[in-house]
Image (cartoon, rainbow, N blue to C red):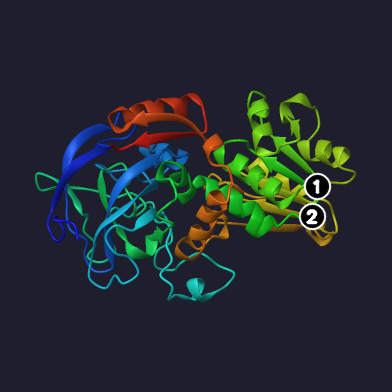
Amino acid sequence: MSTAAGKVIKCKAAVAWEPGKPLVIEEIEVAPPQKMEVRLKILFTSLCHTDVYFWEAKAQNSVFPRILGHEAAGIVESIGEGVTELVPGDHVLPVFTGECKECAHCKSEESNMCSLLRINTERGVMIHDEKPRFSINGKPIYHFVGTSTFSEYTVVHVGCVAKINPLAPLDKVCVLSCGISTGLGATLNVAKPTKGSSVAIFGLGAVGLAAAEGARLAGASRIIGVDLNSARFEEAKKFGVTEFVNPKDYDKPVQEVIAEMTDGGVDRSVECTGNINAMISAFECVHDGWGVAVLVGVPHKDSLFKTHPMNVLNERTLKGTFFGNYKPRSDLPSVVEMYMKKELELEKFITHEVPFVEINKAFELMLKGEGLRCLIRME
């Protein structure tokens, strides 16, 4: 049991005081976990584009001051009332979406969209009492997607914490708590390509490359990467991508290019950009009769998906997915085991590393479009 159990912990956190301004390393107070909550010691975190999006606060309501961060790994420091599945010392991944195990979604074998704990980007407080657990000199500091991992200690609802193999290296598996699992699961759990099939991946950022990795693991024979940045093509070969298409190189829609390359269309496609035109192309490039397209990217709120109804009537299937259809508590431990068995390679996703005090460098790298994942070492 932690000597600080039941007490306020003082620690360092990177606070976003206002939109687009560099994070400031501050000493904060972290309150003890309340009912169905867990306090975690974060050892490693990484920067995901979603953190940057809400830090910039360009297209949505963002709450400030706030502690961002949601892709991380750590150890349970103490537990609140009612927590039975975790004990201090457990190695865990905090996750931006949850699994209460009691709602209709959690009881469904088909859904992972927990009614209680699914992502809420506007909530800056804990569900139990609608108060934050962070403060500076009595002033509240708000949470982000229920995780707030840019802090040495954080408080998370137990339903958003996946207990994992204690032998798994936390500096590698931390990237499984968001982007990599999202792309991987979109392919393995939703698109489900068969051995020898063809797959098109739209967008070759970290999520798209994780989707390509899923296609590689499934035994796809052709993995076609589609991206507007040709500089990404060489790197993508490490993730199983066999061919590349840059839509800017053609004077016809990219779905027509892919259909010509593949004698009528690919068997599966996975869209990881959030661009509505890429989404339409991803759907229209799959083969009639059996093709399945999976949408992963989040589009602009005013976007409309337009395609001719015959594309559906000709037996193409369009699917969406959230966090790769993984239930965080039930499924993430097995994804960690894929890494432990050397089936899944995570090292190639981690292209940079910075100490916590230099966290703003991670933002600079992402804004420049350099690398895939920047690991932030808390100690």
Element under label 1?
loop
The amino acid beneath tag 2 is: Gly
- The image quadrant that residue 13 belongs to is top left
Q: Identify the residue position indicated by label 2 in the image.
A: 291
Q: Position of residue 309 (x, y in %)?
A: 78, 57
- Residue 281 visible to the viewer: no
Looking at the picture, tell me which residue is in the foreground, 213 or 125: 213
Q: Quadrant of the N terminus?
A: bottom left
Q: Quadrant of the C terminus?
A: top left
Mark 2–mark 1 CB contact (< 8 Å) = yes
Q: Position of residue 151 (x, y in %)?
A: 27, 43
Residue depicted at 66% across the width and 52% down the height: 187
Q: Identify the residue position indicated by label 1 in the image.
A: 266
- Residue 137 visible to the viewer: yes
Q: Residues within 10 Å of mark 2 (few under 14, many from 20)?
A: many
Q: Which mark is residue 315?
A: none
Horizontal relation, residue 17 to residue 359: left or right: left
Mark 2 and mark 1: Cα distance apart in space: 7 Å
Vertical position of residue 124 compared to residue 366: above or below? below
- Mark toward the start of the polypeptide (2 vs 1): 1
